[in-house]
């Protein structure tokens, strides 16, 4: 026959398990810790043929902020007035909700590792992979003289992974 103390301890263990499992699952879902160790490689070809009348407009190299980030960002224009941001030899850390933005290079928030408030930028889409070459379409209405920095940014935690300040080619 179990003592009162043993029964109370057994009930507490069951309550702890019943509450603990959903808390652990919710924590995993919110933070996605496995993304810290899993690399996602992308190797997209250039969105234009090398023989076409395509020329680079702006280019710059990535500088890591909160996470080591390296590679080159180049904006290309084609003869039919389409523009692309191409990341080459690109490497950064993986994480949840990481996006590619164009921002103003003189924005002081780009010098911070963690942004207070919202980052003023133009969303180009989620990061396709944390390693490799990748392309992002640009709208013709973007003023590249004003938005002249490519930014790798985690929207969930407001963290700047890396910045490439783009200079005219």
Image: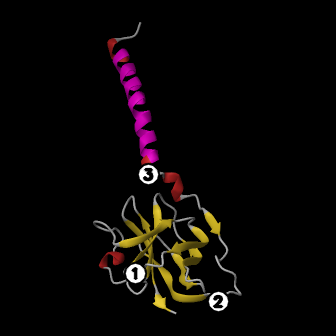
Q: Give SS at disc 3.
A: helix
Q: Tell me the element at label 2.
A: loop
8 part of magenta stretch: yes
Q: Residue at x 38, y 66 (%)?
A: 159
Residue under label 1: 147
Mark 2–mark 3 distance (CA, rounded to whole Å):
45 Å
Q: Are marks 2 and 3 in contact (CB under 8 Å)?
A: no
Compare residues 5 and 33 and report the one nearer the observer: 33
Q: Position of residue 4 (x, y in %)?
A: 33, 12
Is 40 in the magenta? no
Compared with residue 109, is residue 168 higher up or lower down, i.e. above or below? below
Find the residue positioned furthest to the top: 1
Question: Residue lying farthest bottom?
Answer: 169
On the image, numbered disc 3 is attached to which residue?
A: 31
Residue with the mark numbered 2: 53
- Name the colouring of the figure: secondary structure
What span is colored magenta in the figure?
7-29
Dividing the picture into quarters, in which one does residue 18 lie? top left
- Residue 45 percent location from the top left of the image: 67, 74
Residue 43 lies in quadrant: bottom right
161 and 84: which one is in front?
84
Say few, some or many: other residues with alpha carbon within 10 Å of mark 2 (under 14 / 14 to 19 / 20 or more): few
- Look at 54% across and 73% down and name the residue there: 137
Front disc: 1 or 3: 1
Element type at mark 1: loop
Residue at 33%, 16% (x, y): give it.
Answer: 5
Mark 1 to mark 3: distance in Å? 31 Å
């Amino acid at each position: 026959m179990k003592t009162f103390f043993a029964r109370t301890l057994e009930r507490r263990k069951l309550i702890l398990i019943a509450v603990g499992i959903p808390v652990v699952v919710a924590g995993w879902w919110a933070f996605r810790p496995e993304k810290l160790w899993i690399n996602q490689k992308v190797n997209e070809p250039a969105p234009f043929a090398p023989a076409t009348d395509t020329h680079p407009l702006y280019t710059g190299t990535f500088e890591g902020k909160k996470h080591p980030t390296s590679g080159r960002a180049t904006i290309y224009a084609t003869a039919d007035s389409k523009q692309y941001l191409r990341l080459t030899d690109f490497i950064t850390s993986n994480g949840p909700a990481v996006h590619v933005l164009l921002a103003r290079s003189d924005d002081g928030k780009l010098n911070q590792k963690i942004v207070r408030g919202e980052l003023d930028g133009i969303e180009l889409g989620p990061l396709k992979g944390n390693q490799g070459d990748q392309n992002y379409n640009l709208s013709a209405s973007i003023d590249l003289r004003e938005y002249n920095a490519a930014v790798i940014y985690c929207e969930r935690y407001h963290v700047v992974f890396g910045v490439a300040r783009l200079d005219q080619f």
